[in-house]
Image (cartoon, rainbow, N blue to C red):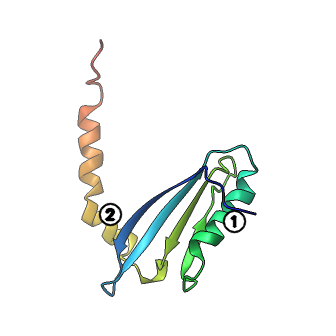
Amino acid sequence: MKTSSNIRINEVDYDLADGRKGKLAVLFYGGDQDPNEVLEAAVDNYTAGSDGKHKVLVDAHRNCPWVRVVVSNISDMPQVSFREFLREMKIRDIIQSKDQTKGRDKHI
């Protein structure tokens, strides 16, 4: 199947642990053909010639067939434990901040 011209791609680069760059691409389809077939062909075309170090993410509930996410080099991303992530993001401060603002809704 030929890739449709109704596909839009948003891309962003991110740092990998070894100093290289990885890429995240979100492919959107807005046409009247079967979105699964069109996006499958688009992902194949987009990843052609790559080293195979990519993953394709699809909506788990399958209720949004118009989007695919392609992520390269997931294994090479810098990784921290979830505990470290929570500490670094100071999640407790965020929760406490939200609790302090409850009940302060402005009525127009």
Crowding near the residue tagged with mark 2, few <14, some 14–19, many ≥20 C-alpha atoms within 10 Å = few
Q: Amino acid at mark 1?
A: Ala
Front residue of 54 and 85 = 54
Query: Residue 94, relative to residue 74: is it above or below?
Result: above
Picture quarter containing residue 68? bottom right
Residue at horizontal 47 percent and vertical 80 percent from the top: 73
Q: Return the mark for residue 41.
A: 1
Q: Is residue 60 left or right of residue 80?
A: right
Where's residue 69, x and y in %?
Answer: 55, 62
Quadrant (top left, top right, bottom left, bottom right) of the C terminus: top left
Where's residue 42, x and y in %?
Answer: 64, 64
Query: Residue 100, relative to residue 62: is it above or below?
Result: above
Q: How many labels sit on residues?
A: 2
Dot 1 lies on which element? helix
The alpha-carbon separation of the residues under discs 2 and 1 comes to 38 Å
Where's residue 71, x and y in %?
Answer: 50, 70
In the displayed orientation, state which residue is furthest to the top.
Answer: 108
Q: Is residue 70 left or right of residue 76?
A: right
Front residue of 100 and 77 = 77
Q: Badge 2 is on which residue?
A: 86
Residue at horizontal 23 percent and vertical 51 percent from the top: 93
Crowding near the residue tagged with mark 1, few <14, some 14–19, many ≥20 C-alpha atoms within 10 Å = some
Residue at horizontal 61 percent and vertical 53 percent from the top: 5
Depth-wise, is mark 2 or mark 1 nearer the camera?
1
Q: Amino acid at mark 2?
A: Leu
Quadrant (top left, top right, bottom left, bottom right) of the N terminus: bottom right
Q: Earlier in the sequence, mark 2 or mark 1?
A: 1
Dot 2 lies on which element? helix
- Asked whether the residues under the numbered discs 2 and 1 touch, taking CB atoms below 8 Å apart as contact, a structural biologist would say no
